[in-house]
Amino acid sequence: MADLSPSARRVQDILDGVGLGHTVIEHARSTRTSQEAADAVGCTVGQIAKSLIFRARTSGAPVLVIASGANRVDEKAVAALIGETIERADPEFVRTRTGFAIGGVPPLGHTEPPLVLIDEDLLALDTIWAAAGTPNAVFRLTPDQLVSMTGGRPAAVKKA
């Protein structure tokens, strides 16, 4: 843990503050995609909690959708849930609003707290893995911990 990169160390420090014993693991190879992350930790793609940042079109607010790695996000469903249309955020928006680059956005510790929706499919799993600040860092947690840490609302966000 002493050798963590600065962004992964930042996430570890936040997790230490939560106090549930989570450990950031940095891999030699990429965990940027859900498949790469699943291969690195030895789990199913569905157990990867991918953090996707959207921009609310009217308010400009960041919207974090934490989806199962096996699912695509239904942007219309998200818009209906938050009462505002959304669009995919560009890399500059993501970095400015979260403090992290695309591919390593964790579910917590963002520069600007986003509105958070959590894919209800994640709630059926015992353990999940989330990004930890870099495109090769992850940490393990439970779905209940994810909801508690983020204050996120579980919802039906996957594209049928």
Image (tube, rainbow, N blue to C red):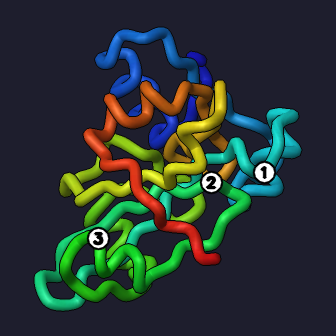
Who comes first in sequence, dot 1 or dot 2? 1
Label 2: which residue? 68
Query: Along the horizontal axis of the image, is 61 left or right of 6?
Result: left
Q: Amino acid at mark 3?
A: Leu
Of label 3 and label 2, which has the lower sequence position?
2
Rendered view: 127 above or below 86: above
Q: Which three-letter amino acid code belongs to the residue tagged 2?
A: Ser
Front in this rendered view, residue 140 or 83: 83
Residue 157 is situated, as x and y percent measured from the top left of the image, at 48, 66
In the image, is residue 5 above or below residue 98?
above
Report which residue position mark 3 lands on.
Answer: 81
Q: Picture coordinates of residue 155 (x, y %)? A: 41, 56
Tell me, yes or no, whether the two marked residues, 1 and 2, touch with CB atoms within 8 Å: yes
* Residue at 55% from the left image edge and 57% from the top image edge: 67
Q: SS of the residue at dot 1? A: helix
Badge nearest the viewer, 1 or 3: 3
User: Badge 2 local density, few (<14 within 10 Å), some, or many (20+)?
Assistant: many
Q: Position of residue 53 (x, y in %)?
A: 40, 68
Tell me, yes or no, whether the two marked residues, 3 and 2, touch with CB atoms within 8 Å: no
Residue occupying the point 65% across, 25% down: 126
SS label for mark 2: strand
Label at residue 45 = 1
**Three-letter amino acid code of the residue under disc 1:** Val
